[in-house]
Image (cartoon, grey):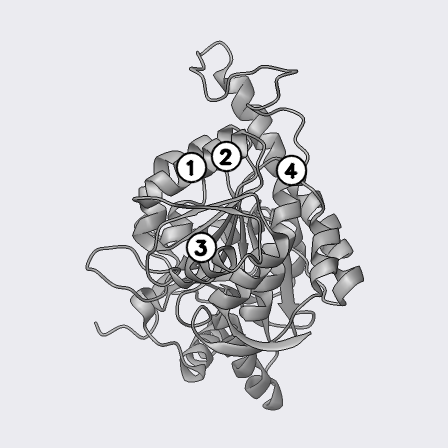
Amino acid sequence: MKDRLSGNEAVSVAMRQINPDVVAAFPITPSTEIPQYFSGYVANGLVETEFVPVESEHSAMSACIGSQAAGARTMTATSSCGLALMWEELYIASSCRLPITMAVVNRSLSGPININADHADSMGARDSGWIQIYSENNQEAYDNFIQAVRIGESSELPVMVCQDGFITSHAIENIELIENEKVKDFVGEYQKSESLLNPGKPLSMGPYDSAVYYMEHKRQQAQGMIDAKDIILNISKEFENITGRKYELFESYKLEDAEVALVIINSTAGTAKDAIDRLREKGIKAGLLKIRVFRPFPLEEIKEALKHVKAIAAMDKSEGFSANGGPVGTEVKSALYGVDNPPKVINYMYGLGGRDVTIEDIMHVYDELKKIVLTGDTGDAYRYLAVRE
């Protein structure tokens, strides 16, 4: 089924087709439209979901934890400071192994106050134990959200599906929807044998965990994230069988013979692809690695994909305040550690607070990479793109 939808509406349609048991949400720009659209589906009887309008994002995640712990398939959506207000509850959801599905519409964090897209919100939560999936466009946001339900329930971990605020969340694009019955069959019925409402097996959830057992429980949680990588790939194959659309841990674009490459997340990948096409016409071997799954981080796979490249720019739409760069840069450098004759890596902060990123900006990054290849001098490995000094 073909349609023209914004990214927010595409995610709300996915939620309608999945028909979860509970949605608890609080409005915050630019994710507000998702629960807004969905509450209309509830009011019009298009879903059987219990919609819980709460008083804050902290309450939204608390309600999600309670309903998921009771055995209900549960979802929410948020952005920016809303995700930050959930911080405490994010860790509770993941440590209790509750497969909540959350749409995160990426927006900068205060301060100064800014409502535009960067990745400070989800990157700040990258080590909270949630699987993180990123979406270049509206189609990917829709497809990723449907897959995320199965991924979370199979791995017993919560999943956040991210897209860039306003850039994709409010922009209308052509999109290919899946038939309602196919979505229903793909996600199936949520069956959880252990829940707070199972009288045959009473349990407590979230109790105090002493030093005697805490470390073993964290090791189990870590193993769940390790195992999630294969789960993500297997579910992606199932999704490809019903849609023809192929998803992996990351997407390579003209990377096989690339001498210079970017590593990037979300919507700027589209701008980078246009820049690469222009450079290829000039005979410059430019390529791209677009990360789809940031948690679990596909370290070995990225190492293999990038080891032949001479110079790489890891692009961060979030400042890590480490004085050495951002989270994407850190992870890429870690992946390449131990490679014989490794690529030279620089790390750019770009697009913070919604700063426009043009094709010319991206071509400037490739020009800098070409200089590094020619001179062998990395120079400053921690840089800002298109900033007024």
Residue positioned 44% across, 11% down in the render: 210
Q: What crowding class fits label 3: few (fewer than 14 Cα within 10 Å), some (14-19), or many (20 or more)?
A: many
Q: Give the distance between the C-alpha atoms of the residues marked 2 and 4, in whole angstroms.
A: 18 Å
Q: Amino acid at mark 1?
A: Ala
Q: Give the distance between the C-alpha atoms of the residues marked 3 and 1, in whole angstroms.
A: 17 Å
**Mark 3 or 2: the one toward you:** 2
Residue 306 in view, yes or no: no
CB atoms of marks 3 and 4 within 8 Å:
no
The image's mark for residue 67 is 2
* Of the image marks 3 and 1, the number of the one nearer the N terminus: 1
CB atoms of marks 2 and 1 within 8 Å:
yes
Look at the picture and state if 47 lies above or below 202.
below
Residue positioned 25% across, 63% down in the render: 114
Q: Amino acid at mark 2?
A: Ser
Q: Give the distance between the C-alpha atoms of the residues marked 2 and 1, in whole angstroms.
A: 6 Å
Q: What crowding class fits label 1: few (fewer than 14 Cα within 10 Å), some (14-19), or many (20 or more)?
A: many
* Of the image marks 3 and 4, the number of the one nearer the N terminus: 3
Q: Which residue matches tag 3?
A: 104
Q: Give the distance between the C-alpha atoms of the residues marked 3 and 2, in whole angstroms.
A: 20 Å
